Amino acid sequence: MTIERKFIENAEVKLKVSRYLQNELVKAGFSRVEIQKTPVLTRITVFVLKPGRVIGRGGHTIDTLTEEIKKRFNVENPQINVMEVENKMLEPMLVARDIAEKFERGINARKVIQTALRIIIENGALGAEIIAGGKLAAKGARAKSIRKSIGYIPKAGNVTELVREAEAVANTRYGNIGVKVRIVPPGTVFPDREIKPIEVPKSILNA
């Protein structure tokens, strides 16, 4: 029971730290965070588009973040490592935000989603899924959802941990639209399945 309780607490702390960094590092192009607890320290690896904004002049920003995480979430000896995002089209958080921004500009939702899927696959992803739900049409229309996927996206079992996932919200003039993006990055190996070459539908190719 004690071990189970500790596991739950660690999961909650990881989620809270992730949300805190996501809010604090929006301008740095926050993508995701990986947290690893070792006997000596808690290693927090942050993936962003602009590492310099996380580090700050003379390391001031990263030092402040480290102290805040230590005090606010009671994390023992946190160490923040900053990694630059190699390809933003393989990062669900960045893709979700980009889609949300396009929704806010009034661009057709179906076209935005199909274009994003095409570019994700062109960048080597083994699978991708985008779900958008909310006020997707004009004023007075009912809320609805669009779900589009391509390639292989596992839905159950431990293999789902190999899928990157993130959400964003578009605040449009007609209401909010939730955006969820799932991506299987290049090189992912599934123990129970061989990934076949992806055939991209014409509707997505022509988007």
Image: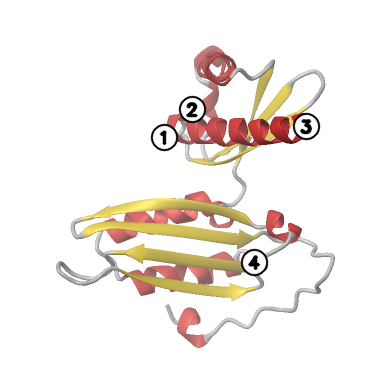
Label drawn at residue 3: 3
Select label 3 or label 4 by which is in front: 3
Label 2 vs label 4, nearer the camera: 4
Cα separation, mark 1 vs mark 3, equals 38 Å
Q: How many marks?
A: 4
Q: Give the residue displayed 71% in from the left and 24% down from the top.
A: 42
Q: Position of residue 86 (x, y in %)?
A: 62, 47
Real-space CA distance between mark 4 and mark 1, rounded to the nearest whole angstrom? 32 Å
Determine whether label 1 and label 3 are within 8 Å by CB.
no
Q: Which residue is mark 2?
A: 53
Image quadrant in which you'd find residue 155: bottom right
Tell me if residue 85 comes above or below residue 96 in the rendering: above
The residue lying at 48 percent from left, 79 percent from top is: 204
In-front residue for pair 87/110: 110
Label 1: few (<14), some (14–19) or many (≥20) C-alpha neighbours in 10 Å: few
Circle on res. 155:
4
Disc 4: CA contacts within 10 A as few (<14), some (14-19) or many (>=20): few
